[in-house]
């Protein structure tokens, strides 16, 4: 891994040679980009050592001198929203004019194949005939000039592009190869905020979480002092995340975990999420950058062949619990996906437009302080009255409903012996009452505690209740999704 990091650094340093004294920009600074509004804006690159570089944009002009290694960086003062295309000019011994630049909201989306899942694949998704299929034909209609996309290519991001390509309007061939969850997130945000949205997708199919964390971040964390971290730490961070720093962003989106779930991870995954989140925030020098992620959808992990460790039907619920535990980290949030599958043996479920939309709702509620967006109910507390467990919920504003108007599913109830029985549940206002034949004294409830569970308990606004169990130490699931700085 050290050789890989050295190779990346040498490649970056090779931007400028004595024979090439021109100013050179990183790929993420390009035509058609969106700059983050209301934040200081770093603009950086390479030049000849000692060369004066000036940057002009939106009435500002600031200059600096490249250091002995040819590195330079300036900071533009925070800008207001602008949907009017403008030109950003960088001048040294050469002049670079970046055209069609907007100012709005910028998010970085990362993870494995379900985040990488392209709009081309989205067009071929199969859903029930009773469902709205219009998102499947989104490519035919997409041409909103206020939505811009940047797709990270792991082999190219560290190389300069003299034509300053990379950012594109979200349409045509550029959109076909782009992340569907990230695009639909951007679309929903644009519709709700009515500002330009830029989204960067940097994802690799099949990737574990470890490659997205810098090797130094593991080395600096005492938690890992007595254990070896495998999974190629830094493998994707170095070529696919580090070169994006310090491009100003509002926050991060994360859809990953399947590869670590196959390893039956629990608390170790929670800590790896903590390491990833804190190290990314440190790289961007902003400890309050929001980090919103996707809870894994139902899938038959226990029936998978050739797994490295034994898996059972509780492997996924326990992994989800580890994902939920990461909400202890400030400025985080998670969306629930128990309803977004059509085949339980498909680890790439459809409905990526709903994934993107729910991530956007989370951002709208927590980051942008909007009060008219749906949020998933979460378990709060349990009381016992006679032979019934009384469950209270929080984090939603409407009532609880059975999504299909059938009796509530996927509840289990246990008494003092710890044996769980199928539960009968009914809604009473914002509470759910659970009982079970043979359980006279309820002690614990589990909900959605099975890899194939698709519970029908929803908020009236259309979002499923997050799976939970009362017989394990739990954190307050909502404290970390509020008070996100703008």
Image (cartoon, rainbow, N blue to C red):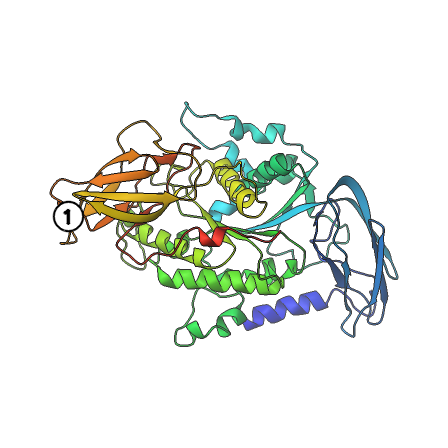
Total numbered labels: 1
22 lies above or below 170: below
User: Residue 6, image x and y in percent?
Assistant: 61, 71
402 lies above or below 51: above
User: Residue 387, image x and y in percent?
Assistant: 16, 43
Comparing 432 with 462, the one in front is 432
Most distant residue in the right direction: 93
User: Residue 180, image x and y in percent?
Assistant: 54, 40
Decide if residue 100 is on the left or right side of residue 252.
Answer: right
For label 1, the SS is loop
What residue is drawn where x is 13% and y is 40%?
437
Most distant residue in the left direction: 438
User: Residue 121, image x and y in percent?
Assistant: 51, 37
Which picture quadrant has residue 53? bottom right
Res 208 visible = yes
Most distant residue in the top direction: 130
84 lies above or below 166: above
Most distant residue in the front direction: 385
Res 90 visible = no
Decide if residue 20 is on the left or right side of residue 279.
Answer: right
Decide if residue 274 is on the left or right side of residue 189.
Answer: left
Q: Which residue is mark 1?
A: 441
What residue is drawn where x is 67% and y is 32%?
143
* Circle 1 residues within 10 Å: few <14, some 14–19, many ≥20: some
Which picture quadrant has residue 287? bottom right
Comparing 71 with 281, the one in front is 281
What residue is drawn where x is 65% and y is 34%?
172
């Amino acid at each position: 891994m050290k050789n890989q990091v050295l190779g990346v650094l040498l490649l970056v340093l090779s931007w400028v040679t004595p024979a090439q004294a021109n100013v050179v920009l990183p790929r993420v600074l390009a035509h058609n980009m969106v700059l983050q509004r209301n934040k200081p804006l770093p603009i950086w690159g390479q030049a000849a050592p000692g060369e004066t570089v000036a940057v002009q944009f939106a009435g500002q002009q600031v200059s600096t001198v490249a250091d002995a290694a040819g590195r330079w960086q300036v900071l533009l003062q925070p800008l207001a929203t602008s949907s009017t295309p403008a030109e950003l000019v960088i001048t040294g011994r050469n002049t670079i004019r970046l055209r069609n630049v907007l100012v709005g909201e910028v998010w970085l989306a990362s993870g494995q194949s379900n985040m990488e899942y392209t709009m081309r694949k989205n067009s071929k998704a199969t859903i029930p005939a009773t469902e709205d299929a219009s998102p499947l034909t989104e490519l035919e209609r997409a041409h909103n000039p206020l939505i811009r996309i940047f797709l990270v290519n792991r082999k190219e991001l560290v190389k300069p592009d003299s034509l300053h390509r990379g950012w594109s309007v979200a349409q045509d061939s550029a959109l076909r190869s782009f992340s569907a969850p990230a695009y639909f997130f951007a679309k929903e945000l644009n519709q709700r905020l009515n500002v330009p949205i830029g989204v960067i997708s940097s994802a690799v199919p099949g990737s574990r979480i470890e490659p997205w964390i810098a090797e130094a971040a593991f080395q600096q964390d005492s938690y890992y002092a007595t254990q070896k971290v495998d999974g190629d730490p830094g493998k994707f961070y170095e070529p696919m995340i580090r070169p994006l720093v310090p491009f100003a962003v509002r926050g991060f989106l994360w859809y990953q975990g399947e590869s670590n779930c196959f390893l039956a991870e629990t608390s170790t995954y929670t800590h790896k999420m903590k390491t990833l989140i804190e190290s990314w925030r440190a790289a961007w020098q902003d400890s309050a950058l929001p980090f919103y992620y996707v809870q894994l959808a139902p899938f038959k992990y226990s029936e998978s062949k050739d797994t490295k460790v034994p898996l059972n039907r509780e492997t996924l619920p326990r992994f989800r619990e580890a994902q939920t535990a990461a909400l202890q980290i400030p400025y985080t949030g998670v969306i629930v996906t128990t309803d977004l599958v059509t085949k339980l043996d498909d680890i790439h479920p459809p409905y990526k437009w709903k994934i993107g939309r729910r991530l956007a709702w989370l951002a709208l509620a927590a980051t942008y302080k909007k009060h008219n967006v749906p949020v998933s109910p979460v378990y709060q507390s349990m009381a016992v009255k006679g032979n019934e467990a009384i469950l209270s919920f929080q984090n939603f504003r409407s009532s609880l409903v059975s999504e299909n108007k059938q009796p509530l599913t996927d509840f289990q109830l246990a008494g003092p012996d710890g044996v769980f029985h199928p539960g009968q549940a009914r809604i009473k206002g914002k509470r759910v009452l659970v009982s079970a034949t043979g359980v006279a004294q309820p002690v614990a409830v589990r909900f959605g505690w099975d890899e194939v569970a698709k519970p029908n308990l929803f908020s009236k606004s259309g979002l499923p209740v997050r799976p939970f169990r009362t017989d394990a130490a739990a954190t307050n699931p909502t404290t970390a999704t509020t008070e996100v700085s703008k």
